[in-house]
Amino acid sequence: MCGTCGCATKGELRISDLSGAQMRPLQAAPRPVLYTNPGHHEAGPGHGPAKGRAHLHEPRGERIPLEQAVLAHNDQHAARNRAWFAERGVLALNLVSSPGSGKTTLLEQTILRLHATVPISVIEGDQMTSNDADRIRAAGARAVQINTGAGCHLEADMVAQAMIELEPQAGSILMIENVGNLVCPAMFDLGERLKVAVISTPEGEDKPLKYPHMFRAAGLVLINKIDLAPYVRFDEVRCRANIAEVNPEARVFSLSALTGEGMEAWIDWLKRMLPRPD
Amino acid sequence: MHELSLAGSILNTVLQHAGGKKISEVCIGIGPLACVERSSLSFCWEAVSADSPAAGARLVYLAAEGSELTIRHLICEED
């Protein structure tokens, strides 16, 4: 456990079954095996580079160049997920936002409008409880809950495990509702087609400037709870300008999942994003 | 907040390449858009590397471009 922020160790990860009746520990995919290299000096005097890797000896010790991405392990899993989605024709979206922006309500309303024509399945990420997955099942879609314990984001291998349970069918949409957090999920590729950032009007129009990494990583931004804009003095024009400042490429829709205002544009966008069957 | 995951990834990678030798330094290339807090990463590194051949190893940061976050090299103690 991390003393700074309380991030979990993998042992506290849990995943639900499809019915939500049981939670079991989620075994993170095995990390690279440690201590497998017996030491290149065993190759004898004048040792050639072990495994083809050059290394230098300097006064401070042996310098081993690596040039390897810190998140290479997660990225490998993400690439595998992405290939799997592409092969099956599954549209996978990674929903990111602060807690309470209305991601789950948005999903419920999306399921009600679309599920009859396009099957939707959902991976729910939260630190605790299976409340969100229960809501998704009540709305009629298949859902698996992942509890990250004290963890602050989903990682690609967790999604891979949830997919075994969910088995999203060809031509369907897989919504991955990340842990509510505008910081950490920006860094972790899950294999999704793109990230959808949700910002709600009570949060204020400057969220994109305060959390630029997340909004820069998003391909689509949804401004939710637009029905509340007059009451919380939310300036939509300024919010859109702020989004454009950190990410000029992002598409932006304003909507209210609760009242249904603006939902058509989102639903149409989802339909357009669906992979076309061959 | 995600620095613990990153420290864990760094540890796994460097242990794989160190061949069981004691590690004294790990050099991380880190861009301004990498979204990583150095002090936080160093703190987590200390926690995850304890009781491993990398215990006590220094994390050294090199300024890099954009969102780069890579392990540039590591230094092991000679036999």
Image (spheres, helix red, strand yellow):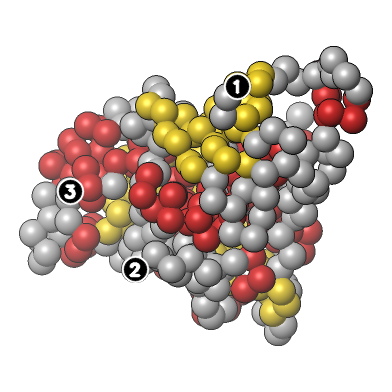
Kindly report the distance in space between the C-alpha atoms of the residues bearing marks 1 and 2.
54 Å
Residue A138 image offset from top left, x and y in percent = 58, 77
Taking the image as shown, residue B26 lies to the left or right of residue B21, namely: left
Q: Are marks 1 and 2 on the same chain?
A: yes
Q: Residue at x 18, y 36 (%)?
A: A241
Of residues A261 and A146, the one nearer the viewer is: A146
**In the rendered picture of this protein, how many numbered marks are placed on residues?**
3
Kindly report the distance in space between the C-alpha atoms of the residues bearing marks 3 and 2.
17 Å
- Quarter where residue A81 is shown: top right
| Residue placed under numbered mark 3 in the picture | A206
Along the polypeptide, which appears first: circle 3 or circle 2? 2
Mark 3 surroundings: few (<14), some (14-19) or many (≥20) residues within 10 A: some
> The residue tagged with tag 3: helix, strand or loop?
loop
Q: Nearer the viewer, mark 1 or mark 2?
A: 1
Mark 2 surroundings: few (<14), some (14-19) or many (≥20) residues within 10 A: some
Taking the image as shown, residue A74 lies to the left or right of residue A131, namely: right
Work out whether residue A77 can be spotted.
no
- Quarter where residue A163 is shown: bottom right
What type is the residue that disc 3 sits on?
Asp
Q: Nearer the viewer, mark 1 or mark 3?
A: 1
Q: Which chain contains the residue that carries disc 1?
A: A
| Residue placed under numbered mark 2 in the picture | A100
Kindly report the distance in space between the C-alpha atoms of the residues bearing marks 1 and 3.
50 Å
Mark 1 surroundings: few (<14), some (14-19) or many (≥20) residues within 10 A: few
Q: Residue at x 20, y 63 (%)?
A: A202
> Which numbered dot is residue A58?
1
Residue A140 image offset from top left, x and y in percent = 61, 71
Residue B64 image offset from top left, x and y in percent = 41, 24
What type is the residue that disc 2 sits on?
Gly
